[in-house]
Image (cartoon, helix red, strand yellow):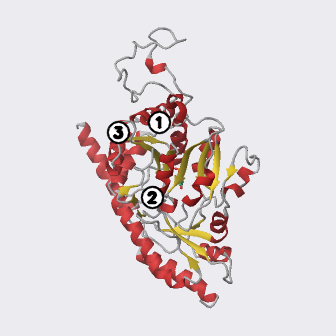
C-alpha cells in the first residue's frame, strides 16, 4: 500500500472515532462551561496527519496557519508562539531591541496600561524592567482615553492594552495620542479575534498585536498564540526574540536563507562565524509545534462561523436580560467598534438587595460557569504586594471604575456550541434568582 493509502485508512478510522465518541457529546444542562474546544473530525485528522509526518517542530502546518491568519487580518507578518502570554512577552521584548534606537523600551521606561486586565498583558512590562502606568477603564471596560494625557511622562514609550472581552477599545483617540507622542501601540487581541473597528480587523491596527489560542478563545490549538505586525523590521525582531535571540531568520530545518551564512563579520567574533549561531538579543524559545498548528489550520476555517455564533449568543442574552436594567449595567460598545464577544458581562448596580457572590454562587450551583473580569483592579492583587509604587509601577488616574468592575462585575460564556436549551436555561436561572428578590 502507498503512504497515502495507509494515511487515508487511518483518517477514515479517525473520522469513525470522532463520530462514535465525540460527535455524540450532546450539550447538557449538567455543566455549562463558559467556553471550550469546538472541533470536528477535521481537527483530529490534521493532528494525526502531523503526527504521521513526525516533523514535530515548526513546519508546514505552522506556515499554513500563519498564512491564514495574515490573510484573515490583512497583515504582512504572523509568527506563532506557544501561548497568548508568550505572544505578549515577545511583543514587548521585541520593542527593547537596541536596533530601535531612541524608540527602544529600556529599563524604567513607562508603558501605559489599564488596571482591569489579564495579568499577562501587564507582566511583560515588569519582566523587562519597565514600569506599568495604570489608568482606569470606562463603561466599555476598555481604557478611558480621557486619562491618557495625565499618564504621559517623558519616560512613556508605549501603550499596551487589550480589547476587553472582545469589545474593541477606542482606537482612533488612542492611536492619535500614540502618534502625537511617538509611542508604540501594542494591541492585545487575545480575546477579540474577528472583531472590527471602523471596518478594519482588530489585530491589524497596532504596531504589534497578539492572539491566544487557549481553548476558551475564538479558535484553539490547545495552548498557543501569535504575534502579528505589518512592519518588516518588527517582524525580524519578533522572530529573533522568539527564537533564542538569534540574528538568523532561517526556519527550522533550513540553512542559509540569507545567502550570507558564512560571509558576515561581527566585531569580537571570529571572521565569517556561522550566522546561524549569532545572537543579537537576549531571547527565548517560545515557538509553536506543528501539531498544535495543525489543529489551528482546521479551526481557522470555522472562525467566521464561531464569531457569528458568539455574537448571536451575546445578543440573545442581552435581549433576554435588558428589561432588568434596574439591576444590571451592561457594557457599552465604543463608537465604530464591532465586538467579537468573548463573554457576556454583567455588572450589578450599586443599590440592589443582593451581592455579586450570591448570584455567582447560585449560577455555579446550577452548573453555569462564571468568570471574573480577569484580575479586576490588578494593583489590588497580591502580586503587587512586593512592588514599590512610584518606582516599579505608577497609578495615573483614580481606578474607581476598575474597582467597580472587580466588586460588582462578572461574566459567563457565549460559547459557540451552546444549544438553545442551554441558553434558555442560563436565562431562566438568572430570572429565578432575581425573582427571589422580588424582581
Ligand atoms: C486579554 C488576554 N491576554 C492574554 C491572555 C493570555 O493567553 P494565554 O492563556 O494563551 O497565555 C489572555 C488569556 O485568556 C487574555 O484574556
The answer to whether the residues at label 1 and label 2 have Cβ atoms under 8 Å apart is: no
Nearest the camera: 269 or 144?
144
Q: What's the mark number on residue 63? A: 3
**Extreme-bottom residue of the structure:** 438
Where is residue 250 drawn, in percent x and y? 39, 27
Q: Is residue 161 above or below residue 276?
A: below
User: Looking at mark 2, is its residue's CB closer than 8 Å to ligand 1?
Assistant: no
Q: What's the mark number on residue 238? A: 1
Separation of residues labelled 1 and 3 (CA atoms):
16 Å
Where is residue 79 drawn, in percent x and y? 42, 40
Nearest the camera: 115 or 241?
115
Q: Which mark is nearer the camera, 1 or 2?
A: 1
Give me the residue at 49% from left, 26% from top.
Answer: 246
Q: In terms of secondary structure, where does tag 3 sit?
A: helix
Q: Residues within 10 Å of mark 2 (few under 14, many from 20)?
A: some
Where is residue 283 drawn, in percent x and y? 54, 31
For marks 1 and 3 on the same chain, the one whose residue lies earlier in the sequence: 3
Residue that badge 2 annotates: 37
Separation of residues labelled 1 and 2 (CA atoms):
28 Å
Separation of residues labelled 3 and 2 (CA atoms):
22 Å
Report if residue 3 is visible in the image. Answer: yes
Q: In terms of secondary structure, where does tag 2 sit?
A: loop
Q: Is residue 261 left or right of residue 113?
A: left
Q: Is residue 381 left or right of residue 366?
A: right
Give me the residue at 47% from left, 8% from top.
Answer: 271
Q: Is residue 268 above or below residue 354?
A: above
Give me the residue at 57% from left, 65% from top.
Answer: 138
Q: In terms of secondary structure, where does tag 1 sit?
A: helix
Q: What's the mark number on residue 12? A: none
For marks 3 and 2 on the same chain, the one whose residue lies earlier in the sequence: 2
Amino acid at each position: 500500500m502507498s503512504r497515502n493509502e495507509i494515511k487515508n485508512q487511518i483518517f477514515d478510522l479517525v473520522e469513525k472515532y470522532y463520530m462514535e465518541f465525540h460527535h455524540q457529546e450532546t450539550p447538557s444542562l449538567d455543566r455549562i462551561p463558559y467556553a471550550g474546544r469546538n472541533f470536528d473530525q477535521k481537527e483530529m485528522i490534521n493532528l494525526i496527519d502531523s503526527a504521521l509526518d513526525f516533523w514535530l517542530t515548526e513546519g508546514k502546518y505552522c506556515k499554513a496557519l500563519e498564512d491564514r491568519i495574515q490573510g484573515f487580518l490583512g497583515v504582512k507578518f504572523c509568527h506563532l508562539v506557544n501561548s497568548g502570554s508568550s505572544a505578549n512577552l515577545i511583543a514587548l521584548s521585541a520593542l527593547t531591541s537596541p536596533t530601535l534606537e531612541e524608540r527602544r523600551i529600556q529599563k524604567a521606561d513607562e508603558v501605559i496600561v489599564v488596571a482591569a486586565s489579564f495579568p499577562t498583558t501587564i507582566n511583560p512590562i515588569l519582566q523587562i524592567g519597565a514600569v506599568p502606568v495604570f489608568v482606569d477603564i470606562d463603561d466599555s471596560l476598555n481604557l478611558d482615553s480621557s486619562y491618557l494625557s495625565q499618564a504621559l511622562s517623558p519616560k512613556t514609550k508605549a501603550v499596551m492594552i487589550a480589547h476587553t472581552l472582545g469589545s474593541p477599545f477606542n482606537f482612533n483617540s488612542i492611536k492619535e495620542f500614540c502618534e502625537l507622542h511617538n509611542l508604540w501601540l501594542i494591541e492585545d487581541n487575545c480575546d477579540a479575534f474577528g472583531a472590527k473597528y471602523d471596518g478594519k480587523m482588530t489585530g491589524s491596527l497596532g504596531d504589534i498585536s497578539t492572539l491566544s489560542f487557549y481553548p476558551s478563545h475564538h479558535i484553539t490549538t490547545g495552548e498557543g498564540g501569535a504575534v502579528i505586525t505589518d512592519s518588516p523590521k518588527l517582524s525580524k525582531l519578533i522572530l529573533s526574540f522568539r527564537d533564542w535571540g538569534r540574528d538568523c531568520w532561517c526556519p527550522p530545518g533550513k540553512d542559509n536563507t540569507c545567502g550570507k551564512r558564512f560571509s558576515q563579520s561581527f566585531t569580537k567574533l571570529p571572521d565569517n562565524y556561522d550566522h546561524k549561531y549569532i545572537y543579537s538579543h537576549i531571547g527565548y524559545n517560545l515557538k509553536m509545534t506543528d501539531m498544535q498548528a495543525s489543529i489551528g489550520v482546521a479551526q481557522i476555517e470555522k472562525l467566521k462561523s464561531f464569531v457569528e455564533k458568539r455574537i448571536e449568543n451575546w445578543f440573545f442574552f442581552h435581549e433576554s436580560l435588558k428589561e432588568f436594567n434596574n439591576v444590571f449595567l451592561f457594557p457599552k460598545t465604543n463608537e465604530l467598534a464591532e465586538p467579537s464577544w468573548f463573554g457576556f458581562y454583567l455588572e450589578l448596580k450599586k443599590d440592589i438587595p443582593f451581592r455579586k457572590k450570591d448570584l455567582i454562587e447560585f449560577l455555579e450551583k446550577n452548573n453555569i460557569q462564571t468568570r471574573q473580569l480577569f484580575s479586576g483592579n490588578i494593583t489590588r492583587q497580591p502580586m503587587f504586594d512586593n512592588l514599590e509604587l512610584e518606582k516599579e509601577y505608577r497609578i495615573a488616574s483614580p481606578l474607581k471604575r476598575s474597582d467597580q468592575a472587580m466588586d460588582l462585575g462578572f461574566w459567563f460564556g457565549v460559547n459557540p456550541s451552546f444549544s438553545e436549551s442551554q441558553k434558555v436555561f442560563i436565562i431562566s436561572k438568572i430570572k429565578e434568582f432575581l425573582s427571589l428578590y422580588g424582581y
